[in-house]
Each structure stands twice: as structure tokens, then as C-alpha cells.
């Protein structure tokens, strides 16, 4: 028994050391993930005195191992004796917060932030704040980057004197010589601002914010846009104009397009933060400039915010500002040279109809809508058609159709077949927007006419279009309105039209089901086996092969098999081949 007690091979620490020296990285990661179990076995005192010192030796391992360690240590407070001993976890996490790999540093800082809440005020000042100051004043860039995320979690719990020291340390990081450190400080300025007293925001943060907003690197300046939102939400209304708006307006006119893009992207958040009065005096002109920006990325970002920006305007001046200041600029984007700008505009412009009401929608938005509907870019057309419902609710389906139908008819009859193809592809979407009654009255005949188009791609698209419409409106609708029109093509003198009829039946059978296919479509397919054109006959064989999978065995044996066997004796080699192939696939040989 004494020998067993002296055997270190069963000691949890010894086992862990052996596993951490293994060449297999996955085994080392698994060992790190078992640290909580080992800690429970050791007890809190041995965990503090033996296990935690061992983790410090691990910080030179592979990044994957360090990532697992940083994650586990964040949950270790109960295992070291509770909040009273939480500071024991700081040394290994401090080392992990300085490694080169960003994902490891971020996880270590996440754990540090979590542990900070478990420190008492005295322990914060005695243990956590010194760690933050060491990281913030460290020689390594990685150390100073990690420090930037820790100020906001320790500042609220310390004394006034220590708060002053933390403010000075953060101020130094914001003016650091290294760009990455300034970026880290800038990106965390908003969170830090949220825990500061109002006097310190005005006296300390605003000067820092202004300096960073004028930084020589645009990667720092663009981060200030989001900080501007945070500061504007905290400041009283009367202080906004003097302390924030000058910097914001400068950012909206920055020489770097990336900064202007960030302003456009965050524009509605800024609008909410600054309130209606500042919006009217400062943000409306800034928004106009962003819509007219020389860079397409900025124009597209601003365009996407158009409807939301207009909705957030005060009701007192909303309609007047939209009609006199916003819409004139927006209309210019209809002919923008960049398709992404036009697509962004098309995705939101219809939302203005709810704000402008019926008369203004017809007068001001309808011309924009019709122009975008005829755009050469498919994404633009799709975005307009996808949002038709907005306009339909405002002006009603009858008036919308009066404007819409002439444009659809014009596109449907365009000399360029690709234009006709585009409108076919949007037909199911249009049908869903307008409903069955409108579709039958206005668009059904148009859809059927595409089945006899002179271009094969149009006839093929029209066939697939019918399938989507049947899926939308149901097979009873198909039986009443679609199938009879399709079957009349079997009498067309042009053999291409008769072939289209076969293609339609092959496609529609899948959505119409066995009963309708057997009773209403199969007889016509079998009749076409006598067609004088060989191309039609071998397509009969191909159609029977496709629809055979949904027919019952009795129909296959009594109706389909005799026709296919007859076609195998056809004089044309292609007809024989496809007939034999159908018999084989349907297991009728």
C-alpha cells in the first residue's frame, strides 16, 4: 500500500504533464479540456499552488492548445476557491493576452473580462488594475492591444484616484505610435465611454474622440463613426452640436471613401442618436452628399438607408424634406453607372410609398419604378418586382396595373430574346404579388403565348414558368386554364410547337399528379406517337419515360407499353433508340 502511495504515475499532475508533452496536438488539447476535472480531483488549494503554475509553462505551446487553455481558465474561479482567489487566475491569462495569435489573445481577454466581475473593489485595485497597467504600458504591441478591452470592466469598481490613472493610461494608448494599438483603442472607446461619468466624457473622451477622428490613418478614423453613435446617445441634446456634430460632418466629407462608407452604413443609427432637430439641420444635407458621392460603394450604402432614414424623420417636416431634398437626389441614382447602386435603390425605394401616400407615390415614385423595371441588370428588376406589394397597398391593384401592364407587355415583346426571358423568370413572383384573379385576367394569355415563341430558350423558360405557376395556384387551376391550352398545341402545324406541348406535359405531370396526368394528358401524348415528324415521335418516347414514373402499373402495361413497342419498330433510328430506352427505364421489357 505504501508503495502505491509513493507511485507518482497515478498523480493527476504527473499524468497531465505527460499528456502535455505528447506529440499529438489533439491529445494535448483534450488534456487542457480536462483541467476542470483535474482541478476537482486536486482540490482548491492544490489547484492554486500546483495546477495554475503548471499552466504558465504551457503558454509556449501551439495556438490551438493555448486557445483551449484561455477558454478553460475563464470558468476556473469556483475551482480555485471562489471570488476571493480569482486573482490567482490572472498570471497565466496575462501571458496569454500577449501572444502573437489574435484569436488566442481575444479569448484570454474574454476570460479576463469575465473574471473581473468576480473581483472585489479592493482586489480590482490590488491585482486587476496593475495587470491592465502592465499590459497597457508593455513593450509588446500585442500586450497594449489586449489592454484596450479591459478598461471598461475595471473602471466602475475602483476609487477616484485609480480611475484617473486608468484614464491617463487609456489616453496614452489612443495616441500610441503603433497603428494597431490606436485601432484597438478606437474600437473600444465606445464601450469605455459608457461607464464614464458625464464630466469625464466631456472633458476627457471628447478630446480623445476628436483627435482620433483626425488621425492620419483612415482605418482609425472610420472606427470613430460607431463611437460617435455611442457618444451621441449619452450626451444631452444641447451638447451634441458643439461636441459631436462638427466631427461627424467632417467624417461624412472625409477624403477616404472608407470613412464616408462607414458614415453611410451607420447613418440611421446616428440619426436615432442625435434626434430630429439635429437631423434636419445637419444630417439631411450630409445624406444628400452621400447619395451624390463620387464612390459607388458609398452611394450604394447610402441608398440602402434611404427608406429607413425617411421613416425616422420627424412627421412635422418629413414629407416636405423627402419631396424637395431627398427624392431629387435619389432619382439621379436611377441612371447611375454602377448596377450595385441601382440595385440598392430598387430594393428600398418602394418603401417610400407608405410615407408619401397615394398621390405623391403616383407622381414621384411611379416614374422611378418604371425606369428601374426596365433596367438591364436582372438584380435591379428583381428587387423592384419583389417590393411591388408596398406600392400595391398604397395605390391599389387597379391603378398599379394601369402603369405596370404596359411596361410588362413592352418587355414581353422586346426584340431581344434575353429581355423576354428576364420577364418570364419574374412572372411567378408577379403572380404571387397580384393574386390569381388579376393574373388570369391580365397575364395568363401572355404566359401561354411564350410557348410558341420563335426562340427555344423562351419556349423552355415558358414551360418551367407554367410549372411554378401551377405550384403556386394549384392543380385544379391548371386543369381548368392551363392544360386545355397546352393540349391545343398538339394540332399546331409547326412541329416545334407540338414538341413544346410534349415538354409541357413532361414538366406539368410532376406537379399535377397521377390522376390528372392519366385522364387528361396521357391520351394526347399517346396520340402524338403517330406524328409524321420523327423528332416529335422520339420526344413522345422521352415524355413517356418521364411521366411513366407517376403512372400506375396497369396504365403502363395496357397503354404505354404497346405504344413504346410500336415505336421500337419505327423507321427512324432515333425513335427506335429512345423507345427502347424508355421500355428499359420503365421496366417494361
Image: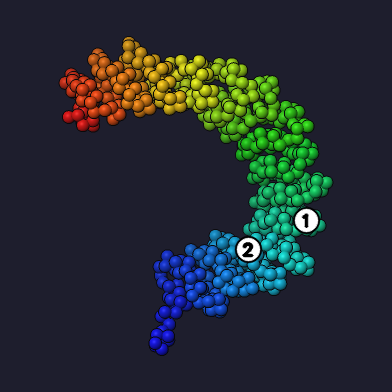
Q: How is the image coloured?
A: rainbow
Q: Is residue 8 above or below residue 327?
A: below
Task: Determine which residue is flagged by label 1.
Answer: 201
Residue drawn at (57%, 65%) of the image: 74
Task: Determine which residue is flagged by label 2.
Answer: 113
Give percent across and percent down for residue 471. 43, 27
Give percent across and percent down for residue 585. 23, 32
Rendering quarter of residue 182: bottom right
Helix, strand or loop for disc 1: helix
Helix, strand or loop for disc 2: helix
383 lies left or right of 233: left
Give percent across and percent down for residue 475. 40, 24
Residue drawn at (75%, 63%) of the image: 167
Decide: few, some or many residues near mark 2? Use Cα within 10 Å; few <14, some 14-19, many ≥20: some
Give percent across and percent down for residue 253. 72, 42
Rendering quarter of residue 169: bottom right
Looking at marks 2 and 1 on the same chain, the residue that comes earlier in the sequence is marked by 2
Report the quarter where the N terminus lies.
Answer: bottom left
Q: Nearer the viewer, residue 177 or 247?
A: 247
Residue drawn at (77%, 45%) of the image: 245
Decide: few, some or many residues near mark 1? Use Cα within 10 Å; few <14, some 14-19, many ≥20: many
Count of numbered circles in the view: 2
322 lies left or right of 535: right
- Residue 70 at least partly seen: no
Report the quarter where the C terminus lies.
Answer: top left
156 lies left or right of 513: right
Q: Nearer the viewer, residue 54 or 337?
A: 54
Residue drawn at (65%, 51%) of the image: 219
Amino acid at each position: 500500500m505504501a508503495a502505491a502511495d509513493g507511485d507518482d504515475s497515478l498523480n493527476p499532475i504527473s499524468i497531465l504533464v505527460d499528456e502535455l508533452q505528447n506529440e499529438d496536438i489533439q491529445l494535448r488539447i483534450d488534456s487542457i479540456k480536462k483541467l476542470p476535472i483535474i482541478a476537482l480531483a486536486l482540490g482548491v488549494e492544490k489547484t492554486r499552488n500546483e495546477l495554475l503554475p503548471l499552466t504558465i509553462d504551457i503558454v509556449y505551446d501551439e495556438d490551438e492548445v493555448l486557445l483551449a487553455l484561455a477558454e478553460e481558465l475563464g470558468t476556473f474561479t469556483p475551482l480555485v476557491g471562489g471570488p476571493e482567489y480569482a486573482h490567482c487566475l490572472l498570471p497565466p491569462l496575462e501571458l496569454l493576452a500577449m501572444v502573437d495569435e489574435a484569436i488566442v489573445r481575444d479569448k484570454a481577454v474574454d476570460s479576463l473580462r469575465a473574471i473581473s466581475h468576480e473581483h472585489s473593489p479592493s482586489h480590482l485595485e490590488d491585482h486587476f488594475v496593475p495587470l491592465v497597467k502592465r499590459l497597457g504600458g508593455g513593450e509588446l504591441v500585442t500586450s497594449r492591444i489586449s489592454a484596450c478591452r479591459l478598461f471598461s470592466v475595471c473602471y466602475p469598481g475602483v476609487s477616484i484616484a485609480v480611475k484617473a490613472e486608468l484614464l491617463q493610461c487609456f489616453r496614452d494608448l489612443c495616441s500610441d505610435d503603433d497603428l494597431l494599438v490606436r485601432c484597438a483603442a478606437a474600437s473600444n472607446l465606445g464601450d469605455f465611454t459608457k461607464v464614464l461619468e458625464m464630466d469625464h466624457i466631456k472633458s476627457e473622451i471628447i478630446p480623445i474622440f476628436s483627435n482620433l477622428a483626425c488621425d492620419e490613418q483612415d482605418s482609425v478614423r472610420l472606427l470613430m463613426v460607431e463611437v460617435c453613435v455611442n457618444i451621441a446617445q449619452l450626451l444631452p441634446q444641447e451638447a451634441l452640436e458643439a461636441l459631436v456634430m462638427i466631427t461627424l460632418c467632417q467624417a461624412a466629407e472625409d477624403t477616404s471613401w472608407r470613412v464616408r462608407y462607414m458614415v453611410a452604413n451607420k447613418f440611421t443609427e446616428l440619426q436615432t442618436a442625435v434626434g430630429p432637430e439635429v437631423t434636419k439641420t445637419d444630417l439631411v444635407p450630409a445624406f444628400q452628399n452621400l447619395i451624390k458621392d463620387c464612390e459607388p460603394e458609398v452611394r450604394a450604402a447610402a441608398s440602402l438607408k434611404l427608406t429607413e432614414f425617411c421613416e425616422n424623420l420627424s412627421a412635422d417636416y418629413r414629407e416636405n424634406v423627402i419631396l424637395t431634398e431627398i427624392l431629387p437626389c435619389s432619382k439621379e441614382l436611377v441612371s447611375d453607372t454602377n448596377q450595385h447602386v441601382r440595385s440598392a435603390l430598387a430594393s428600398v425605394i418602394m418603401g417610400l410609398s407608405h410615407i408619401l401616400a397615394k398621390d405623391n407615390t403616383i407622381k414621384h415614385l411611379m416614374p422611378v419604378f418604371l425606369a428601374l423595371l426596365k433596367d438591364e441588370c436582372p438584380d435591379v428588376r428583381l428587387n423592384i418586382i419583389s417590393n411591388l406589394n408596398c406600392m400595391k397597398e398604397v395605390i391599389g391593384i387597379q391603378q398599379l396595373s394601369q402603369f405596370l401592364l404596359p411596361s410588362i407587355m413592352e418587355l414581353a415583346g422586346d426584340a431581344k430574346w434575353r429581355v423576354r426571358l428576364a420577364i418570364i423568370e419574374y412572372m411567378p413572383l408577379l403572380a404571387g404579388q397580384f393574386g390569381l384573379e388579376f393574373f388570369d385576367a391580365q397575364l395568363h394569355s401572355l404566359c401561354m403565348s411564350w410557348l410558341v415563341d420563335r426562340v427555344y430558350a423562351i419556349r423552355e423558360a415558358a414551360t418551367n414558368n407554367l410549372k411554378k405557376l401551377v405550384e403556386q395556384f394549384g392543380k385544379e387551376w391548371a386543369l381548368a386554364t392551363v392544360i386545355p391550352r397546352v393540349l391545343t398545341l398538339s394540332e399546331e402545324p409547326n412541329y416545334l410547337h407540338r414538341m413544346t406541348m410534349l415538354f409541357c406535359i413532361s414538366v406539368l405531370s410532376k406537379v399535377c399528379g397521377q390522376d390528372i396526368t392519366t385522364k387528361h394528358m396521357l391520351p394526347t401524348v399517346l396520340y402524338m406517337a403517330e406524328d409524321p415528324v420523327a423528332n416529335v415521335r422520339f420526344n413522345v418516347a422521352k415524355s413517356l419515360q418521364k411521366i411513366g414514373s407517376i403512372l400506375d402499373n396497369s396504365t403502363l402495361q395496357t397503354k404505354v407499353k404497346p405504344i413504346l413497342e410500336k415505336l421500337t419498330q419505327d423507321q427512324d433510328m432515333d425513335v427506335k433508340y429512345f423507345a427502347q430506352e424508355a421500355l428499359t427505364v420503365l421496366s417494361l421489357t
